[in-house]
């Protein structure tokens, strides 16, 4: 059906072909995320002709940098981190409209200068520009940036029109429930919720979006997607890398804040939510919030629902790896957890009684993220082997990364005269079916923010629902210090306490 708000020439074309004329302002322009993710994403969008003809990029940072230098830095970052080789024509379309502005985040005058620059670019373009303020700084300066966007009038530019200003906010979104609420309060004082795009880059991953398609576009799954058939659900976000050069941040964060509160909780919400009434942003977000609110508070203390660990030295992929406390910038007495796992109970009609196990950690045996739905075992009566019923539980596993795809574990007959069974796997692999050059999460997310589609971003109430669950765990661990902090060898699958969480409920972790 024709969309009356779209230009007649764009009717029938993909919504991505109609991004309005835009200026993206990156706060934190010389940061790591800008170099590794944002600049390559913008470049690849230019390569795919997905940027609007009037597109401008302004780097904003505290470091005094000449415009030429910033362009050189951007080009070097793209060369190093882009999924594609740099193509001079595609890069020059971005480079010729790239600017840099030096300023403090709490310096009101710098925001006025930014406003003047945007007005100048608008005069040059001869049309209204949408301003997208991408806040990719340490969280300590989120508040002054947002307040200055308000005070300088930048947040209100073209308000109420398709060109109204938007703010993209990187994680971490708060440190706990109180700080997330405070940040939401500051934001709400300056911007409407429709102007705010809180990033969780896991939602931009193809495989995470495919989860919705697999769940709701296949009639065979939904009838089984409940407590009558599902025995447990296991969500794993495992990394083989250590803390790297981010000890300063990670020491203050730990695994629960860094990975569980956001990425794994989002995977959980998409896996367990009710079918949304449409694929519109609000419909999906409403279901996610309902699901997060149905999760029961976690039992803490011995025999409770949580486990944590910290990596000691070990071998990862055959190479020696140092322990966390020996890493650069880490306190030798650190009690920061590099591994966390939770056992969650969702108290609603669909899931009552089905445990959801979540785990994430650094320096684990391998890098793998997956969601595994483990079904109840069929009665083995027909297939007893040597007096034993030995059927494997059917399992549907979505491999989020790497080696993206999904697998179904079935029991099959071993060829031969006897009726003997063996678990076998059916695989679907993205790379085999669709080729391997899929867009990076950030390409999709930057473009979605440009066309004001909030589906893959987190709403304010979602962040609070997730923090409400996690904050008591943080406080408990803070009070416990090193008590209950297990160590695990780098290259293993995590601490024993995490295994115990499952054993007590008759389950064990998968070895993905
Ligand atoms: C980030 C965390 O959000 O996600 C990092 O801060 C982590 O600690 C990273 O390494 C993992 O992202 P991905 O896309 O590589 O799985």
Image: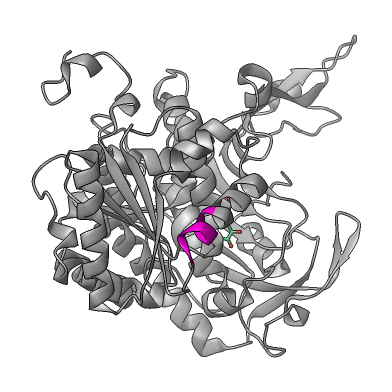
As drawn, which residue projects farthest toward the top? 417
Q: Position of residue 9 (x, y in %)?
A: 22, 15
Q: Position of residue 158 (x, y in %)?
A: 11, 49
Compared to residue 3, the image places residue 47 above or below, namely below
| 337 relative to 283 in the view: left or right | right
**Total marks in image:** 0
Residue at 68% across, 61% down: 499
As drawn, which residue projects farthest toward the left? 160
The scheme the figure's colours follow is: one colour
Q: Decide which of 466, 81 is in the foreground and name it.
A: 81
Compared to residue 26, the image places residue 229 above or below, namely above
Compared to residue 390, the image places residue 74 above or below, namely below
User: Which quarter is ligand 1 in?
Assistant: bottom right
10 is within the stretch colored magenta: no
Q: Position of residue 71 (x, y in %)?
A: 51, 53
Q: Decide which of 16, 70 is in the foreground and name it.
A: 70
| 494 relative to 234 in the view: left or right | right
The answer to whether any part of residue 397 appears in the image is yes
Q: Quadrant of the N terminus?
A: top left
70 is within the stretch colored magenta: yes
Residue 358 sits in quarter: bottom right
Q: Which residues are magenta?
A: 66-71
Residue at 75% across, 32% down: 389
The answer to whether any part of residue 236 appears in the image is no
Q: Position of residue 99 (x, y in %)?
A: 40, 55
| 453 relative to 405 in the view: left or right | left
Residue at 74% across, 47% down: 511
Q: Decide which of 328, 175 is in the foreground and name it.
A: 328
Q: Quadrant of the C terminus?
A: top right
Q: Main secondary structure of the magenta part?
A: helix
């Amino acid at each position: 059906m024709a969309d009356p708000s779209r230009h007649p020439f764009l009717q029938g074309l993909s919504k991505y072909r109609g991004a309005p004329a835009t200026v993206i302002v990156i706060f934190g322009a010389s940061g790591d995320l800008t170099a590794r993710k944002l600049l390559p994403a913008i470049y690849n969008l230019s390569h795919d002709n997905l940027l609007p003809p009037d597109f401008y990029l302004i780097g904003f940072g505290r470091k005094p940098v000449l415009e030429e230098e910033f362009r050189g830095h951007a080009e070097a970052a793209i060369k190093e981190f882009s999924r594609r080789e740099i193509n001079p024509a595609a890069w020059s379309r971005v480079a010729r409209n790239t600017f840099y502005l030096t300023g403090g985040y709490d310096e009101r005058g710098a925001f006025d200068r930014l406003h003047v620059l945007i007005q100048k670019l608008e005069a040059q373009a001869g049309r209204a520009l949408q301003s997208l303020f991408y806040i990719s700084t340490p969280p300590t300066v989120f508040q002054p940036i947002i307040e200055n966007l308000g005070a300088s009038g930048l947040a209100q530019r073209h308000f109420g029109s398709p060109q109204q200003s938007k703010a993209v906010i990187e994680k971490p979104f708060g440190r706990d429930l109180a700080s997330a609420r405070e940040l939401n309060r500051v934001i709400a004082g300056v911007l409407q919720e429709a102007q705010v795009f809180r990033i969780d880059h896991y939602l931009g991953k193809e495989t995470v979006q495919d989860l919705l398609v697999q769940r709701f576009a296949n009639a065979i799954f939904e009838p089984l997607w409940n407590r009558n058939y599902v025995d447990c659900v296991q969500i794993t976000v495992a990394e083989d890398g250590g803390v790297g050069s981010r000890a300063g941040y990670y020491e203050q964060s730990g695994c629960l804040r860094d990975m569980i509160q956001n990425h794994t909780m989002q995977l959980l919400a998409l896996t367990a939510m009710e079918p949304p009434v449409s694929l519109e942003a609000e419909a999906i977000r409403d279901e996610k919030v309902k699901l997060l609110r149905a999760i029961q508070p976690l039992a803490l203390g011995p025999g409770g629902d949580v486990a944590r660990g910290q990596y000691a030295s070990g071998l990862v992929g055959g190479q020696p790896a140092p322990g966390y406390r020996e890493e650069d910038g880490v306190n030798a007495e650190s009690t920061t957890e590099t591994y966390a796992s939770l056992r969650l109970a969702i108290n609603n009609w669909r899931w009552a009684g089905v445990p959801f196990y979540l785990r994430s950690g650094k320096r684990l045996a391998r890098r793998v993220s997956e969601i595994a739905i483990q079904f109840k075992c069929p009665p083995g009566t027909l297939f007893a082997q040597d007096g034993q019923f030995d059927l494997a539980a059917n399992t549907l596993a979505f491999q989020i990364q790497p080696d993206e795809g999904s697998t179904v574990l079935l029991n099959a007959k071993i060829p031969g005269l006897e009726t003997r069974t063996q678990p076998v796997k059916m695989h679907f692999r993205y790379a085999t079916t669709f080729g391997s050059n899929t867009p990076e999460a950030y390409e999709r997310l930057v473009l979605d923010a440009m066309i004001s589609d909030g589906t893959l971003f987190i709403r304010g109430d979602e962040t609070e629902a997730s923090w409400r669950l996690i904050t008591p765990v943080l406080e408990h661990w803070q009070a416990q210090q090193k008590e209950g902090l297990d160590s695990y060898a780098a290259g293993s699958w995590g601490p024993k306490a995490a295994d115990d969480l499952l054993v007590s409920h008759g389950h064990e972790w998968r070895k993905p």
